[in-house]
């Protein structure tokens, strides 16, 4: 299915002229700021086309990919790093301008290979840099075949490798819409973030995501951000290793749509699934998701899990809710856990015993 989708996207999105980032747009590679080369390629393709990024190491600072109908294809030996001379916390790439509509943009490794975004060695504020920031106003977009290296630093407020947010243009709210995120991974994340955090987005599909550290896929709406909305989300084949969770949902004070997630696996993570209410500001009603579903959840025991109390501790279980204010319905089916010693050998675990469990889990769970 993934191969078919990528082939169809290539046929549709690669129409027009094709140019080379180095030969045609002047990327120098050797420790210089190559952001302008990405912008020059966009300037040369006002009606869309293809840009090929050949083998090499490129330093980039907030390259804003905001021209419609362009496919950016990276060689498997292309490595993108934050420009070493920047002293602000900017993403490496930004999809969408945040100031208007952008349609049909793809950022991908050359199938079946992947390219690398490496923020792990940045000297200034390395933990506070996103690999990709997806802004509101972008529509029909694809991120595929990307490995992102983050800078694990104990006790810092690290950002997710890929973040999604909304944009307000006057009174009009713009969300990232109709996006496909396929074959993505991250390493080096701390417990609170991870590969992907969606603070706003509509009609998004995620598939074949792998995260080492943190939360692999996190649906969290903005802690009161005006207009933020997450809904019509589908995801499958989401994996966490030695982190916090494969999947998390947390609405704070926002009203959201539904999600349908399946085939979640954790290896030595605190849990595979976590559902939360989030933080509710004084005087505001609690947010929620529309009735949602999670199917086929598997947890394998390990001792390098991450939580907010300690950076490493034994894994807890397959599914958990830790917030007594959860007021939305999530149906979880087909849970299994393997290798957990008592009393952690329950597929449904309670992080703090005084909290109830409003998540609906049928009696088909297995603990081995």
Image: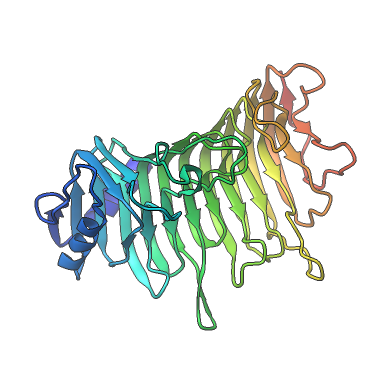
* Residue drawn at the location 52% of the way across and 67% of the way down: 166
* Residue 311 image point, x, y percent: 65, 31
Frontmost residue, 188 versus 273? 188
* Residue 243 image point, x, y percent: 60, 32
Query: Quick one: which residue is furthest to the bottom in this view?
Result: 170
Q: Considering only vertical position in the picture, is 81 above or below 316?
A: below
Quarter holding residue 332: top right
Query: Quick one: which residue is furthest to the left in this view?
Result: 23
**Left or right of 204: which side holds 6?**
left
**Left or right of 81: which side holds 225?**
right
* Residue 22 image point, x, y percent: 14, 49
**Left or right of 1: which side holds 43?**
left
* Residue drawn at the location 54% of the way across and 83% of the way down: 171
Frontmost residue, 45 versus 235? 45
| Image quadrant in which the N terminus is located | top left
| Image quadrant in which the C terminus is located | top right
Quarter holding residue 333: top right
Tally the marks.
0
Indicate the colouring scheme. Answer: rainbow
* Residue drawn at the location 33% of the way across and 43% of the way down: 81
Q: Does residue 13 appear anywhere in the picture?
A: no
Frontmost residue, 57 versus 198? 57
Q: Considering only vertical position in the picture, is 300 above or below 353?
A: above
Q: Does residue 145 appear anywhere in the picture?
A: yes
* Residue drawn at the location 53% of the way across and 48% of the way down: 159
């Amino acid at each position: 299915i993934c191969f078919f989708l990528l082939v169809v996207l290539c046929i549709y999105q690669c129409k027009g002229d094709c140019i080379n980032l180095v030969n045609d747009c002047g990327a120098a590679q050797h420790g210089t700021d190559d952001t302008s080369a990405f912008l020059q390629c966009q300037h040369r393709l006002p009606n869309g086309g293809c840009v090929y990024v050949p083998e090499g190491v490129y330093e980039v600072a907030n390259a804003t990919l905001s021209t419609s109908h362009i496919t950016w294809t990276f060689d498997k030996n292309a490595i993108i790093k934050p420009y070493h001379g920047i002293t602000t916390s900017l993403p490496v790439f930004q999809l969408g301008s945040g100031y208007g509509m952008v349609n049909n943009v793809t950022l991908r490794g050359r199938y079946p290979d992947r390219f690398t975004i490496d923020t792990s060695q940045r000297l200034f504020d390395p933990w506070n840099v996103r690999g990709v920031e997806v802004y509101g106003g972008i529509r029909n977009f694809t991120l595929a075949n990307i490995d992102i290296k983050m800078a694990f630093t104990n006790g810092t407020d690290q950002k997710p490798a890929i973040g999604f947010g909304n944009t307000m243009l006057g009174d009009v709210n713009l969300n990232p819409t109709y996006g496909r995120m396929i074959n993505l991974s991250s390493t080096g994340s701390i417990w609170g973030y991870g590969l992907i955090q969606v603070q706003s987005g509509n009609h998004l599909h995620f598939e074949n995501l792998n995260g080492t550290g943190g939360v692999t896929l996190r649906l969290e709406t903005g802690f009161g951000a005006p207009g933020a909305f997450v809904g019509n989300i589908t995801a499958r084949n989401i994996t966490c290793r030695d982190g916090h969770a494969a999947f998390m949902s947390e609405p704070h004070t926002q009203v959201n749509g539904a999600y349908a997630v399946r085939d979640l696996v954790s290896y030595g993570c605190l849990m595979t699934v976590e559902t939360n209410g989030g933080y509710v500001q004084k005087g505001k009603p609690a947010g929620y998701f529309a009735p949602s579903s999670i199917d086929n959840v598997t947890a394998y025991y390990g001792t390098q899990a991450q939580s907010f109390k300690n950076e490493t501790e034994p894994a807890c279980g397959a599914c958990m809710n830790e917030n007594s204010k959860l007021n939305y319905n999530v149906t979880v089916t087909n849970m299994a856990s393997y290798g957990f010693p008592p009393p952690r050998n329950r597929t449904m675990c309670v992080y703090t015993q005084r909290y109830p469990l409003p998540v609906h889990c049928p009696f088909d769970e297995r603990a081995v």
